[in-house]
């Protein structure tokens, strides 16, 4: 590894709150090398390891910080705290793209940028686990980095249990009321990749007012519409 690259990785890890000392940062370099770069060692192996590391660390976090929750609530929360969406958000927040090694195709694919961030973020967790020696010692940097982010996300999710699962919650309510399935109608409003309002969606439930939502994808627009609908029926749900 070139000295300037080593220093770049040291500075990046320090920005995450991690001091690496004289550790071998080869696993970190591997984790941050996307397959599109065409190198012999890339992020895929460590992404596989990072998936397991992430799930275990998230389970430990929930048991330490939210011991009063039941196993069902733990499972639901963990699913959110290890999702690709969450990983992509954390990766963007920490500026992982500034240290990624990407090939030309991945660099020019703005639509797939979130997926690349999530993949390499997961690989980075595997890289941290290896660089810190595996075992419980390998989980220490993961907890150090992610615990503040998990605390914030967990608080948001506990205050809004339907967060990011609004479609499922709306469907459960509508079927419970004997109103059948919500009907979604989406339309593309622009063809600009990354436009946060690229798609518009309207959701209709039998006998209820329609609600609309916007998003960068059809799925996100549907979620936004479902969220708007839930906002009006929550009092009824709680009564």
Image (cartoon, rainbow, N blue to C red):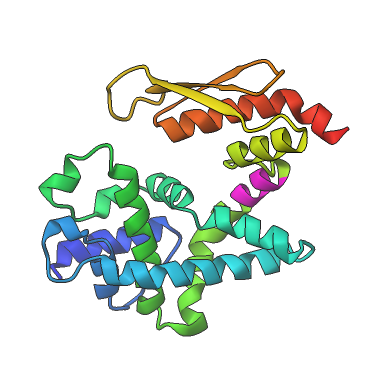
Q: Quadrant of residue 44?
A: bottom left
Q: Residue at x 64, y 62 (%)?
A: 75
| Residue 77 locus on image (x, y percent) | 63, 55
Residue 42's place in the image compared with 148, above or below, is below
Q: Residue at x 40, y 66 (%)?
A: 125
Quarter of the image with the N terminus is bottom left
| 14 or 58, nearer to the observer | 58
Q: Residue at x 40, y 23 (%)?
A: 199
| Residue 138 locus on image (x, y percent) | 45, 78
209 drawn magenta:
no
| 16 or 92, nearer to the observer | 92
Q: Residue at x 65, y 43 (%)?
A: 156
Is 164 left or right of 103, judged from the image as shown? right
For this orientation, the residue located farthest to the right is 239
What span is colored magenta in the figure?
152-158
Is 184 left or right of 159, judged from the image as shown? left
Is 138 left or right of 108, judged from the image as shown? right
| 146 or 74, nearer to the observer | 74
156 drawn magenta:
yes
What is the total number of numbered labels drawn onto the structure image?
A: 0
Quarter of the image with the C terminus is top right
Q: Quadrant of residue 189?
A: top left
Is 86 left or right of 108, judged from the image as shown? right
Residue 135's place in the image compared with 25, above or below, is below
Residue 51's place in the image compared with 190, above or below, is below
Majority SS type along the magenta span: helix
Q: Quadrant of residue 114?
A: top left
| Residue 233 locus on image (x, y percent) | 75, 26
């Amino acid at each position: 590894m070139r000295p300037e690259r080593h220093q770049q990785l040291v500075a990046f890890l320090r920005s995450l709150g991690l001091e690496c000392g004289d550790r071998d940062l080869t696993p970190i370099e591997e984790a941050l090398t996307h397959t599109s770069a065409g190198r012999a060692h890339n992020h895929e192996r460590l992404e596989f390891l990072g998936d397991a590391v992430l799930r275990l660390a998230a389970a430990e976090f929930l048991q330490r910080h939210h011991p009063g929750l039941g196993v069902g609530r733990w499972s639901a929360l963990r699913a959110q705290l290890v999702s690709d969406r969450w990983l992509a958000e954390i990766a963007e927040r920490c500026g992982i793209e500034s240290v990624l090694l990407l090939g030309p195709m991945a660099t020019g694919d703005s639509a797939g940028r979130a997926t690349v961030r999530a993949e390499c973020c997961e690989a980075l967790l595997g890289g941290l686990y290896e660089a810190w020696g595996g075992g419980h010692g390998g989980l220490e940097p993961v907890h150090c980095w992610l615990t503040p982010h998990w605390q914030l996300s967990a608080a948001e999710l506990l205050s809004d249990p339907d967060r990011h699962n609004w479609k499922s919650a709306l469907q459960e309510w509508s079927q419970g009321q004997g109103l059948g399935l919500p009907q979604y109608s989406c339309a593309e409003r622009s063809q600009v990749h990354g436009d946060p309002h690229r798609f518009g969606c309207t959701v209709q439930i039998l006998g209820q007012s329609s609600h609309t939502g916007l998003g960068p994808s059809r799925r996100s627009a549907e979620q936004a519409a479902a969220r708007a609908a839930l906002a009006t029926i929550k009092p009824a749900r709680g009564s």
